Image (tube, helix red, strand yellow):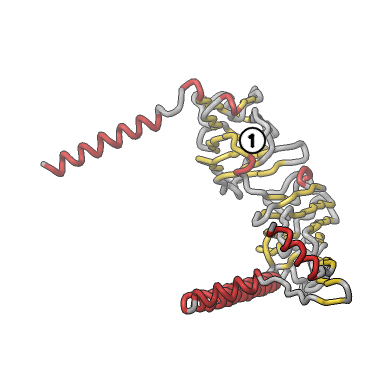
Amino acid sequence: MTTLSSLGLHIILLSNLTNATVSSFDPDRVHTAVMRLSSNCTSTYVRLDQYDRVELTSSVWPLHDSIIQANTSCTAHFMTGNKGQGICIHSNDLFFKRQEPRIHVKVYTSKFGPERAFNHAHSKFRNWCTPHSLVTIELSTLRDFYNQNGEYRYSFLISNVSKDGIDTHYHLDSFNQCNLSHTLKSGEEMRISGQRYPSPDRLPSNCLLHLETSSTDEYEELCILIDDYRLVDNCLSKLEVSGLNSRFWPETEYLGCNDTNSQLRSKTEMCSGAKFLTINLTRSAIDDTGMIFKATVKVKKHPFWEVISNEQSELRGLGFVKGLTFFIAAINSFAGIGAAILASMIRHPRSFWKNWAETMNATHQCTPVHYEGEYKNHDVTYPEVSTSHLEEVTEAKAY
């Protein structure tokens, strides 16, 4: 009986928690947009700051248009209302039944090509964020197909988030992420990728990225490490990293399709020499997808400089200890002298004060000098007095 009561209590609590979770969103602040391929689908525009929850889904009933024509596409646009915010897309569901009829879901932030693209062969997607304030999701097909709910499905949650909470990630296959500069703070890290798949429609022939750090630490630099590196048959690319510390590595290091001895390929971490790095990826053709790499750039102390920094810290510590020892020794010396004086005062108090008073108050002894007719005592001259005159004065006073 007790077990049944406990179970009932748990069910009630769970029910209350579920109701509270569902009702935590104001119905007026929840928006669900439906986008499914059709002959008359219109573009959808949503301001994210006007809602607490925004969902884009393909589920709709009843279905219209039994046959969907080839090259049909529909779009949905999502925009933030605040300057300091970006957009995140979270996938609840993404499924393509078969490769044909070539149904695609693409995510755009500019006209140069999709930032992300998904199809039957590439449908793994959980979460993606961008600092851009406008995102377009496109649903398209390259072939005719019979419209039914089981052919494809998706459900995305779209939200606006603070740009500070978005990881910094540069994709060198995107036109709008080339020829840029970025400043990293102390301890900050970022990621760079050369090629994503599916690739955008067009690839930049030259993608330049200039990195620097605002760290004021003498030994902190920008350090780069190639985490992953793969080649395919049509590789015509070359990666160039310049600004490296020439004391340990070449100032400029290259990674090409046939550079088997490149230190970048050997996953060696290399650091800058003057708090900046320049990364440049060149492609010989706009469809050159042969080099796939991922790199991490972080503001840190290279192990060599970290050893030197630790040694200098230890030397500064030794200097402090030395100064402290001298200070304590000086205090001990003064304390010893004071104790000796105090002991002498206690043993011979009168003798001590007498000697001290005689030393401090003794006057200068003057020796009188007698000259003929007068006495001279340094600066004062006294005339000589006759004895007969004194006798006369004495006799006069007697009267």
The quadrant in which residue 242 appears is bottom right
In the drawing, does residue 130 fall left or right of residue 97? right
In the drawing, does residue 51 fall left or right of residue 178? left
Which residue extends farthest right? Answer: 372
219 shown above or below 13: below
Q: Position of residue 7 (x, y in %)?
A: 20, 41
In the drawing, does residue 92 fall left or right of residue 287? left
4 shown above or below 199: above
Q: Where is residue 234 in the image (x, y as percent from the top left)?
A: 78, 60
Closest to the observer: 221 or 55?
A: 221
Which residue extends farthest front? Answer: 399
Residue, x 67% and y 55% (percent of image)? 186
Residue, x 55% and y 40% (percent of image)? 90
Q: How many discs appear?
A: 1
SS at circle 1: strand
- Report the residue marked by disc 1: 85
Residue 246 in sight: no
Closest to the observer: 151 or 193?
A: 193
Residue, x 66% and y 25% (percent of image)? 43
Which residue extends farthest top? Answer: 28
194 shown above or below 229: above
Q: Where is residue 162 in the image (x, y as percent from the top left)?
A: 61, 38
The quadrant in which residue 176 appears is top right
Quadrant for the N terminus, please.
top left
Q: What residue type is labelled 1?
A: Gln
Residue, x 73% and y 75% (percent of image)? 365
In the drawing, does residue 301 fall left or right of residue 347? right
118 shown above or below 333: above
Q: Residues within 10 Å of mark 1 (few under 14, many from 20)?
A: many
Closest to the observer: 87 or 64?
A: 87
